[in-house]
Image (tube, rainbow, N blue to C red):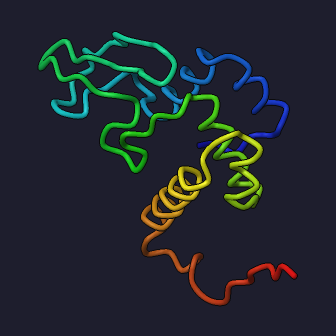
Amino acid sequence: MALMDIPTTFKITSNEKKSLTYLEKIRWTNGIICPKCYSLNAKLISYRDTNIYYRCGKCYFRFTLFTGTYLNRCKLKPSKLILLVKLFSLGLSARITSNELGLNYRTVLFLFDRIRQAILYHNRGNDNLFGEVELPVFR
């Protein structure tokens, strides 16, 4: 997800359709691609809150925005997910993020872990994530 400022984040997350379109553009830059047969003949078939489904016109496989990704089976609304990633990038804890977004703490903790796994996977081979790490001390 591209790094954006807070006003832009609020503008995108003001509407679920805007949030969905933003996430689609990040996931599929050249149009919706079926994760099973890689066809470009897939379309949005259902959009109700967190139940967002696509269907491939070639193999008829039904999938979600996050099928085949680290966020597979994520049931958050697109706007909440974008806000969660923004708060993660600002360094907020899972507890504070869960309170701010009104989400279950374990859900936020799980998604934070998934985000960290994706970062580690995409930075493998780079020495940027190794070495001394500074952690805040809470008293």
**In the rendered image of this protein, does residue 79 appear above or below residue 101?**
above
Can you give x and y, in whole percent of width and height, for residue 121 in the image? 42, 64
Picture residue at 68% right of the left edge, 49% below the top: 98
Question: Residue 106 or 6: which is nearer the viewer?
Answer: 106
- Quadrant hosting residue 64: top left
Q: Is residue 23 left or right of residue 15?
A: left
Can you give x and y, in whole percent of width and height, for residue 22 in the image? 58, 26
**In the rendered image of this protein, does residue 25 appear above or below residue 105?**
above
| On-image quarter of the N terminus | top right
| On-image quarter of the C terminus | bottom right
Of all residues, the one furthest to the left in this rendering is 59
**In the rendered image of this protein, does residue 56 appear above or below residue 111?**
above
- Quadrant hosting residue 62: top left
Picture residue at 54% right of the left edge, 22% below the top: 20
**In the rendered image of this protein, does residue 50 appear above or below residue 124?**
above
Can you give x and y, in whole percent of width and height, for residue 48 in the image? 47, 14
Question: Residue 84 or 101: which is nearer the viewer?
Answer: 101
Picture residue at 54% right of the left edge, 50% below the top: 107
Of all residues, the one furthest to the bottom in this rendering is 132
Picture residue at 37% right of the left edge, 13% below the top: 44
Can you give x and y, in whole percent of width and height, for residue 57 in the image? 19, 12
